Structure formats: C-alpha cells, structure tokens
Amino acid sequence: MKRLLVVLVALGGAAFWWRRRSSGGAADGWSAAATTPPESPSEPLGGEVDPELLAILACPLDKQPVTRQGNYLVCQECQRHYPIRDGIPVMLIDEALTPEQAAAAPA
Ligand SMILES: [Zn+2]
C-alpha cells in the first residue's frame, strides 16, 4: 500500500516533468514558457508528510534514508534536497537540489 503510494508519487512527478519538458518546443519554447514558467510549480513547498511514508522513503540515487529538513527531505549520503510540495515528497533526482543549490536557496 505504502509502496504503491510512493510509486504513484514518482509517476506523477515524472509525468509532470515530462509534460513540462514537452510543452516547450525547441523553436517556440520561450513563448510557451511565458504562460507556464518551468521553475515555478503551483504547489507550495512544505506541508505535512505522513511519518510512516517518511520512514520508507529513500534517495533514488543511492537508496539511503532521507531526513526532513524544513521543506525538503535530505539524503544522508549525497545530501541532495528533495522538495516537499503540498505534503507530497518529490523523490526525483531531476527535481532535487544539490547541496550547493540548497546552500544558496532560501530555507
Ligand atoms: Zn542520495
């Protein structure tokens, strides 16, 4: 049940990423980007995450456990920051902040 939820979250995130990626063509991508800014997801960061869900989540890169730090889940191994959007952890390497980006971003 919980694993299914994680898979659904990952698929939803992947679909979101793909839709975003394919909405902007090579030639007229900028006009499309004007209506849907790629770096401004509508979901607010943060929200409550089910502690049981948190306990089974792992970094997709190195399969290490993650711990919550503010609005992000941080991998104990590679220190990537996975955003929590409206209570949904986005466990995608593509969406994660690197330690360098996280240091530069507001908390
Ligand atoms: Zn990691």
Image (cartoon, grey):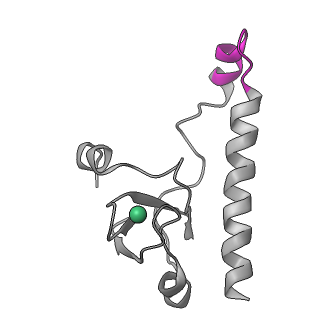
Q: Magenta residues, as a range?
A: 24-33
Q: Residue at x 69, y 33 (%)?
A: 21
Residue 80 picture location, percent across and down: 37, 57
Residue 50 shows up from this direction = no
Q: Residue at x 59, y 34 (%)?
A: 38
Instruction: Quarter of the image for the C terminus: give it.
Output: bottom left
In the rendered image, the vertical position of residue 53 relative to residue 95, given as above or below: below
Q: Residue furthest top?
A: 27
Q: Foreground residue, 100 or 40? A: 100
Q: Position of residue 72 (x, y in %)?
A: 40, 64
Image coordinates of residue 34 in percent, x first then y, are 63, 21
Q: Residue at x 72, y 23 (%)?
A: 24
Of the four image quadrants, the one with ligand 1 is bottom left
Q: Is residue 71 visible?
A: yes
| Residue 95 falls inside the magenta stretch | no
Left or right side of 2 for 23: right
Q: Examine the image and state in which quarter residue 81 appears.
A: bottom left
Q: Quadrant of the N terminus?
A: bottom right
